Amino acid sequence: MGLLNTAIAPSTTMEGTTRERTRAYPWLVFALIFGLLLSDYMSRQVLSAVFPFLKDEWALSDSKLASLNSIVALTVGVLAFPISLLADRWGRIKSLVTMAVIWSAATLLCALAANYGQMLGARFLLGVGEAAYGSVGLAVILTVFTPRLRATISGAFLSGATFGSVIGVALGGIIATHMSWRWAFTSMAVLGLLLVALVRVLVTESGLARHQADEAVAEQAAMDTYRAPLSTLVTNPALLCAYVGSGLPLFVSAALMLWLPSYFNRSHGMAPDKAGTTAALFIVLMSIGMIVFGGLTDRLSRDRPARKWVIAAIYCTVSGVLLFAGFGGASGTLQFALLGAGALVSAGATGPMSALVADLAHSSVRASAFGIGILANNILGIALGPMVIGALADHIGLESALRLSPVVYIGAVAALLLGRRLYPAGRAMVTALGAADSR
């Protein structure tokens, strides 16, 4: 049994029974579910690395190329909430494994696609598989870590989206250049299926139950006797602001992840493999930023949770200024430095906003709240950003379209500052629900 039997700590539940927890198991759960999230976004974002090949082979416009990405995000957005509800009832681990099998199979279908229509259908199926993975995976992970680490753990977990994009773009570009774009999709699918096998063997519902954080045990006990109405997820004004404040910043991040390889290919004359590798470095910066700024936010808001709103607004503002200046500047070291700094901060609000969604949703419907958050993230950001930038690129050029993308941060900052004002009342609504479940 080795590592998993080390550092065992006893814990007593509300009923007085003793559970045994190990320090290693939560991190094993995190690593495996994080690994599948990497696979998720590798399968999704490898597409951007093969854009030049698809554009030449099938004579596709930028709008059609963008639609192959946005169909995934739209499908994820529409299905995230209902599948999250289903996962809460059917079993979260079984749901995660099933999702991963579906998206891996869909990625294989992408490799076999003979035209735009078949690729679009395969990408739709990939979106079905990915729909609720982020919300259900995050809900699972948060049960084995203490709430005081929510922004840190949320930011670290969700950084898997950008790290997966990095690997998908970089590795996909190399494989597509030296083998073929079809092999790029195939390799992502095989990796996903291998990770599914590991999760199926090593992570179980019973294991999670034995290693729940004390706060999660108390929350589960409350859930067994009381479930908050789903309407509370859309009637809390502060929570609505959290959804919008989470989704709009991803407009910019998603646009960068999808279009940077093409930007470096067209504006800087890089070959597809070099363009993919260069873009991957910038996406790495986004991933680092999600982790670093999530941890920084936890530290700065430890005694005052409402600070998360203002801190997230600062991240958006700084990123917007840097990216606008970078895309508008002359090619050279300074431009790359500005774009790199802007990318670093661009996803900094992700951890804080996930933590705020958790704070403003009753524990019994928290996974469903994350599902609505993913809906907002995909509709407002991950689907809308690449599609709008692609449509603009057809008319004004890709570089000019990317320069305009930070304008969306204005709406994000407005939602965040409004959420800050509404936060005390929003927390009071959650506290009232807590009082209801104790009666």
Image (cartoon, helix red, strand yellow):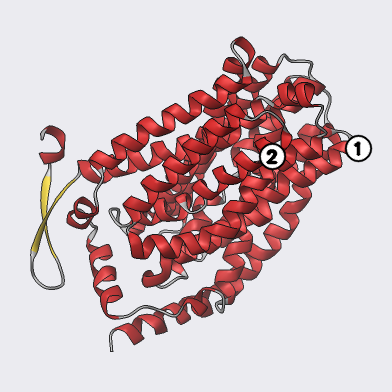
Is residue 116 something one can see in this rendering?
yes
Tell me the quarter of the image containing the C terminus: bottom left
According to the image, label 1 marks what residue? Answer: 396
The x and y percentages for residue 290 are: 52, 43
Single out the residue that lies furthest toward the bottom.
439
Tell me the element at label 1.
Answer: helix
Q: Which mark is residue 68?
A: 2
Badge 2 amino acid: Leu
The x and y percentages for residue 153 are: 39, 48
Left-right relation of 222 to 274:
left
Tell me the element at label 2.
Answer: helix
The x and y percentages for residue 238 are: 57, 72
- Mark 1 vs mark 2, foreground winner is 2
Q: Residue at x 41, y 70 (%)?
A: 365
Is residue 313 something one can see in this rendering?
no
Badge 1 amino acid: Ile
Single out the residue that lies furthest toward the top.
178
Q: Nearer the viewer, residue 91 or 154?
A: 91
Q: CA distance from mark 1 to mark 2?
A: 21 Å
Q: Earlier in the sequence, mark 1 or mark 2?
A: 2
Category of crowding for the residue at label 2, using alpha-carbon neighbours closer than 10 angstroms: few (below 14), some (14–19), many (at least 20)? many
Q: Quadrant of residue 246?
A: bottom right
Q: Nearer the viewer, residue 245 or 366?
A: 366
Q: Residue at x 30, y 53 (%)?
A: 145
The x and y percentages for residue 424 are: 51, 76
Category of crowding for the residue at label 1, using alpha-carbon neighbours closer than 10 angstroms: few (below 14), some (14–19), many (at least 20)? few
